[in-house]
Image (cartoon, grey):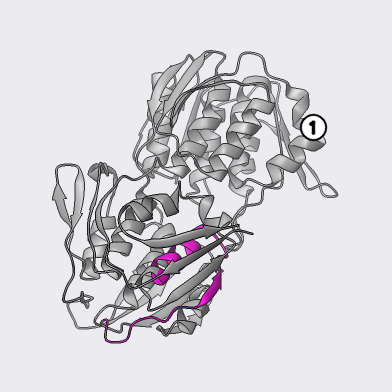
């Protein structure tokens, strides 16, 4: 179990380049299974979860060539489908949440898709019902081996249909879209997710020859085609990492420039951080954050009541940044209620922040009330264990702002989502050491 030693309390300065979006890359990589032609993808982040999926694709028989850092070509023209029922696949697939999204492409192209119960973050239940209910509506037969926790769907032919999703699941929508592009007839998906990741997937599929309309809305129409071809695709910068760097700059009172952020795909993320009192400047496609010498003040509602920040399906605020918002609020002027609606365990890391001196009341598994210190009482260094990716980066930001030297164990969780995190932090002045 790896460890970070972090000497906190130092101001940082410089430029930082966000990595490619992890959540987009997981979908895009699975989409290469839809065609026997070559697909080239750029700006793929070099992180554990992505590398696991690339390895899984290679074991499935996809021809993979690394062209440069972050750039790969993939060709799925001679797959070994027997691998899907092997013990090796059951082990590899169960260790990666994103592996569920290979099922839709395999079902569409080969008439069958299998997956072991996926693992991933311990942040509460994340149901797979949306995925499989969508496949069933397209005409697939579902089976589940309870002893081995192994899911399967099979179909001689998928048939387009109308469906209303029970939840606007990003991965569920992506999986169903990838199945529907090769189905007979037209599929209409209502209550579809419309996150930029999903929009990127649809745009890529259209360049491959799919016929998807309504991209960017919650009503998608997919006219099935006979086959898809190859294409080139570039992954967006990771909006979650961009939000993390905004939080880091505020908490350490640092002057930072976040490069090439794709402003048009950030939604209301900048607005939410500004409500916390953080100054953000748009400089071309960069975000400039000045040194907050006098701290930052949370805005109340216009009637004077305490601000609530809650997650919601896009274009609402992404749940992946609520932990960052919570950490930022610990040093703000004012108070805020954080309402995590979508996952029931993501706020359980606040006990570590309370140990560091933060004033937080955990109301229930979904809500936390934060009373800011206004930097009049610095967080204290402590020893922590990272429970998941997003809590891990939040604790790292807290440690970088704290007085003294903190220790964070289980940093593999952070590495699952953030590329070369310690190297990039050192480049802007952070005092951080990685140990085995």
Q: Quadrant of the N terminus?
A: bottom right
Camera-side residue of 413 and 196: 413
Q: Nearer the viewer, residue 68 or 178?
A: 68
Residue at figure coordinates x 54%, y 75% from the top left: 383
The answer to whether 355 appears left or right of 7 in the picture is right
Magenta run includes residue 88: no
Horizontal relation, residue 237 to residue 138: left or right: left
Residue 156, percent from left and from top:
71, 21
Number of numbered tags placed on the structure image: 1
Q: Is residue 87 above or below residue 359?
A: above
Can residue 71 be seen from the camera position used here? yes
User: Image point 59% across, 28% down: which residue?
Assistant: 105
Residue at horizontal 54 percent and vertical 39 percent from the top: 50
Determine if residue 341 is in view. no
Report x, y in % for residue 350. 49, 76
The quadrant where residue 213 appears: top left
Give SS at disc 1.
helix
Rendered position, 96 above or below 401: above
Above or below for 332 versus 273? below
Location of residue 401 (image quadrant) = bottom left
Identify the image quadrant of the C terminus: bottom right
Task: Give the extent of the magenta segment.
Answer: 375-399
Q: Would you name the residue on which mark 1 appears? A: 85
Residue 398: in magenta span: yes
**Label 1 neighbour load within 10 Å: few <14, some 14-19, many 20+:** some
Kindly identify the residue that appears in the image at 83 percent across and 46 percent down: 148
Is residue 104 depicted above or below 169 in this figure? Answer: above
In the rendering, at what x and y percent does residue 426 appear? 37, 55
């Amino acid at each position: 179990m790896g460890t970070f030693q972090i000497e906190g309390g130092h101001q940082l300065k410089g430029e930082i380049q966000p990595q490619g979006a992890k959540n987009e890359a997981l979908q895009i990589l699975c989409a290469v299974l839809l065609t026997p032609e070559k697909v080239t993808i750029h700006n793929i982040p070099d992180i554990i979860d992505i590398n696991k999926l690339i390895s899984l694709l290679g074991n499935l028989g996809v021809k993979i060539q690394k062209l440069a850092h972050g750039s790969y070509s993939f060709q799925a023209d001679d797959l070994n489908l027997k691998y899907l029922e092997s013990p090796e696949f059951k082990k590899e697939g169960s260790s990666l949440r994103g592996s569920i999204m290979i099922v839709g492409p395999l079902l569409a192209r080969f008439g069958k898709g299998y997956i072991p119960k996926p693992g991933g973050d311990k942040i509460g239940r994340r149901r797979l019902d949306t995925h499989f209910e969508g496949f069933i509506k397209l005409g697939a037969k579902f089976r589940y081996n309870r002893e081995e926790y192994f899911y399967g769907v099979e179909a001689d032919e998928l048939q387009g249909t109308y469906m209303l999703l029970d939840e606007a699941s990003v991965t569920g929508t992506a999986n169903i879209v990838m199945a529907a592009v090769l189905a007979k007839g037209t599929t209409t998906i209502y209550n579809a997710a419309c996150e930029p990741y999903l929009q990127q997937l649809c745009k890529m599929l259209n360049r491959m020859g799919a016929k998807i309309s309504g991209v960017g809305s919650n009503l998608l129409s997919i006219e099935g085609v006979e086959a898809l071809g190859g294409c080139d695709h570039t992954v967006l910068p990771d909006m979650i990492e961009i939000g993390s760097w905004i939080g880091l700059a505020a908490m350490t009172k640092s002057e930072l420039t976040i490069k090439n952020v794709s402003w048009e795909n950030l939604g209301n993320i900048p607005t939410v951080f500004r409500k916390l009192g953080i100054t953000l400047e748009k400089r071309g496609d960069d975000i400039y954050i000045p040194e907050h010498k006098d701290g930052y003040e949370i805005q109340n509602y216009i009637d004077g009541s305490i601000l609530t920040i809650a997650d919601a399906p896009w274009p609402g605020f992404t749940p992946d940044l609520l932990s960052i918002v919570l950490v930022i609020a610990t040093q703000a002027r004012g108070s805020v209620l954080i309402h995590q609606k979508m996952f029931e365990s993501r706020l359980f890391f606040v006990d570590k922040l309370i140990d560091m001196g933060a004033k937080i009341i955990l109301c229930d598994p979904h809500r936390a009330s934060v009373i800011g210190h206004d930097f009049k009482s610095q967080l204290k260094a402590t020893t922590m264990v990272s429970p998941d990716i997003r809590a891990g980066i939040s604790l790292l930001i807290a440690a970088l702002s704290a007085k003294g030297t903190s220790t964070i164990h289980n940093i593999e969780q952070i590495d699952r989502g953030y590329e070369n995190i310690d190297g990039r932090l050192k480049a802007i002045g952070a005092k951080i050491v990685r140990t085995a």
